Image (tube, rainbow, N blue to C red):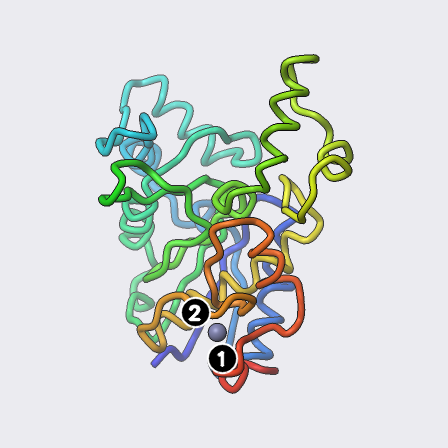
Amino acid sequence: MVEQVTLYRAPSTVADAGEIAGWLDDRIEPSVDVRERFTATRADDELAEEFAKTRVLSPYDRDTGNTMLGIVRYEQRALDSPEQAGGVIYDGLAVQRLLGERLPDGERGLDHLHIVLTSRALGTWGDHDGRWHKRVNVLGQPALVSVPGLYEAPAKPESYYKEKQKHALVSGDTPPREVLESQVEGDFLVEDDPRTTDALKGYVLQAFHYLETGEGFCVTDGCRLANPHRQPGVIDAQLRDPEFCSKHNDLYSP
Ligand SMILES: [Zn+2]
């Protein structure tokens, strides 16, 4: 049984750990506390190199890791100033392992769930199709919840990619969010979306639900514990009422 949940802040200010913890606290028995960014307090001299080993090198290559000096230095900078890092995908299970090794002594039991909000993009290898897939969260101890994963892992509507491509051909860059939103039908989340905090709540609860019950994602569309593969499904599950399917409403309604 989980008795304590600790949520670690993300570098990104659009993911408000305090608000997420308050939401969670209203819905589960165990007490919930918030701590500073995990790597700000738990990093050691080897961590940068270990992160370098978990880098995904190509979407179709299962082997990870590049520990050339420049890469390790980049990873050290990413630890020191995480708001400047980006553009890299990391092996989510390997990151979970290396952060797990750095959990505080005496807090490693499954009665104390640690949930790390991160600004890193995380992936897991798909044995069935031989490629990496971005993930919003990686369940287990510690659980990881990726802020960019929220924008990038669930696919956006088809017309989003068309508009983006069209714009890139004309002007060579990415169109502003307003343009995409007005041109693309269907709702989706973009980087630094003001709905980020709200949308992450269900993904944080999934981490608790998994450790407490052993159950993975909910199969009912629209439930906060579901794992939609497309953005409109994420909006429906995380941002629209009702919060839960009837089964999970009995467990988690505030
Ligand atoms: Zn459900």
Label 1, on which residue?
Answer: 248
**What residue is drawn where x is 43% and y is 54%?**
137
Q: Does mark 2's beta carbon lie closer than 8 Å to ligand 1?
A: yes
Element at label 1:
helix
Q: Does mark 1's beta carbon lie closer than 8 Å to ligand 1?
A: yes
Mark toward the start of the polypeptide (1 vs 2): 2
Q: Amino acid at mark 2?
A: Cys
The x and y percentages for residue 185 are 69, 43
The label number, if any, that marks residue 15 in the structure image? none
Q: Is residue 119 above or below residue 141?
A: above
Pick the residue in front: 72 or 201.
201
Q: Amino acid at mark 1?
A: His
- The C terminus sits in image quarter: bottom right
Marks 1 and 2, how far apart in space?
9 Å
Image-based side of 183 in relation to 90, left or right: right
Label 2, on which residue?
Answer: 218
The x and y percentages for residue 97 are 27, 50
Image-based side of 45 in relation to 11, left or right: left
Pick the residue in front: 247 or 41.
247
Image-based side of 2 in relation to 6, left or right: left
**What residue is drawn where x is 67% and y is 47%?**
186
Outermost residue on the bottom side: it is: 250
Element at label 2:
loop
The x and y percentages for residue 30 are 47, 80
The x and y percentages for residue 178 are 77, 35
Q: Dot 2: few (<14), some (14–19), or many (≥20) neighbours within 10 Å?
A: some
**What residue is drawn where x is 76% and y is 32%?**
179
